[in-house]
Image (cartoon, helix red, strand yellow):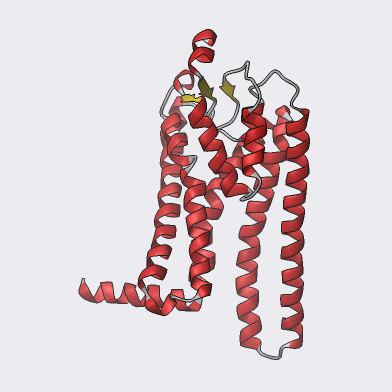
């Protein structure tokens, strides 16, 4: 078995550890979450693309977020759903497919330096064949090696700390400026809108920030494997599903277009 695996570059993905009785309910819940995330993000892109009144830089910028969300959830969910319905011993994936999946996982999570991160792992020889994760990512790849992976660990930790720190600092500075404007402004309607928008945005950001940090750091601590796997799946499901609601429905122009289309549809029916 092992020799065959090494010779053909076939890996075994651990996937989700669910009992046969709970596999179908878990499959249905994850499938519904995936469909909702994809449909809502595609709907947002179509709405912005087809409505001429929304053809401005701000709304075109909104299109980048749903595209990234669709990539982030699609890169793992179809494979994960497929593996849930398989026996644990039948969840095979080729090494090339695993590298491609890890690449796009890092496109979604870090958006820069992912080529170097994946390259550091691909350069290693691998003596193991089991991906101890629900899907392939950079840390899972370099864990396949029996070589010294201290460079991968150091680079991964340093890069993660820098990326998360810069993200947190930029968000903090932005919110400080928003609070300052709200304090000096006498416009209650504007302040109420800012608080409503920022609170929902902050909630989604914190979910993404915490779950992303947890599954990256806990890769270095095998005793917390279950918590890491849960956080990694949440990272690819929750934000892509919530972002269209937060950034789409909270935007007045988009919300008005959705209501208008909904009312028009109901009149036709």
Give residue 50's quadrant in the image. bottom left
In the displayed structure image, the side of residue 48 where residue 187 appears, left or right: right
Give residue 102's quadrant in the image. top right
Report the residue that reaches farthest toward the left: 269
Nearer-the-camera pick, 122 or 127: 122
Callout count: 0
Question: Where residue 240 sits in the image (x, y, percent)?
Answer: 52, 54
Report the residue that reaches farthest toward the bottom: 186
Does residue 186 appear anywhere in the picture?
A: yes
Seen at 62% across and 65% down, the residue is 201
Seen at 50% across and 28% down, the residue is 96
Seen at 43% across and 39% down, the residue is 78
Seen at 49% across and 47% down, the residue is 73
Question: Where residue 154 sits in the image (x, y, percent)?
Answer: 78, 36
Question: Where residue 23 sits in the image (x, y, percent)?
Answer: 44, 31
Picture quarter with the C terminus: bottom left
Nearer-the-camera pick, 25 or 177: 177
Above or below, 229 relative to 201:
above
Question: Where residue 45 sits in the image (x, y, percent)?
Answer: 42, 63
Does residue 135 appear anywhere in the picture?
A: no
In the displayed structure image, the side of residue 220 where residue 59 appears, left or right: left
In the displayed structure image, the side of residue 32 where residue 6 appears, left or right: right
């Amino acid at each position: 078995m092992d020799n065959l695996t090494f010779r053909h570059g076939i890996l075994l993905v651990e996937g989700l550890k669910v009992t046969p009785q709970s596999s179908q309910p878990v499959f249905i819940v994850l499938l519904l979450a995936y469909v909702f995330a994809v449909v809502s993000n595609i709907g947002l892109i179509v709405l912005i693309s087809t409505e001429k009144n929304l053809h401005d830089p701000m709304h075109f910028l909104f299109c980048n977020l749903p595209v990234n969300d669709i990539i982030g959830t699609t890169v793992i969910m179809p494979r994960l759903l497929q593996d849930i319905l398989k026996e644990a011993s039948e969840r095979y994936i080729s090494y090339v497919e695993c590298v491609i999946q890890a690449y796009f996982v890092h496109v979604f999570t870090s958006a820069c330096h992912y080529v170097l991160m994946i390259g550091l792992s691909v350069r290693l020889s691998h003596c193991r064949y089991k991906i101890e994760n629900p899907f392939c990512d950079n840390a899972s790849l370099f864990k396949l090696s029996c070589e010294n992976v201290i460079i991968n660990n150091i680079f991964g930790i340093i890069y993660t700390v820098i990326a998360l720190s810069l993200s947190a600092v930029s968000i903090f500075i932005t919110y400080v400026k928003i609070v300052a404007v709200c304090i000096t402004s006498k416009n209650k309607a504007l302040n109420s809108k800012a608080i409503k928008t920022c609170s929902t945005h902050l909630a989604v950001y914190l979910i993404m920030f915490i779950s992303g940090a947890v599954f990256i750091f806990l890769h270095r601590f095998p005793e917390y494997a279950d918590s890491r796997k849960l956080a990694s799946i949440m990272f690819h499901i929750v934000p892509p599903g919530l972002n269209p609601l937060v950034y789409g429905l909270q935007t007045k122009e988009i919300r008005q277009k959705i209501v208008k289309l909904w009312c028009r549809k109901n009149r036709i029916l």
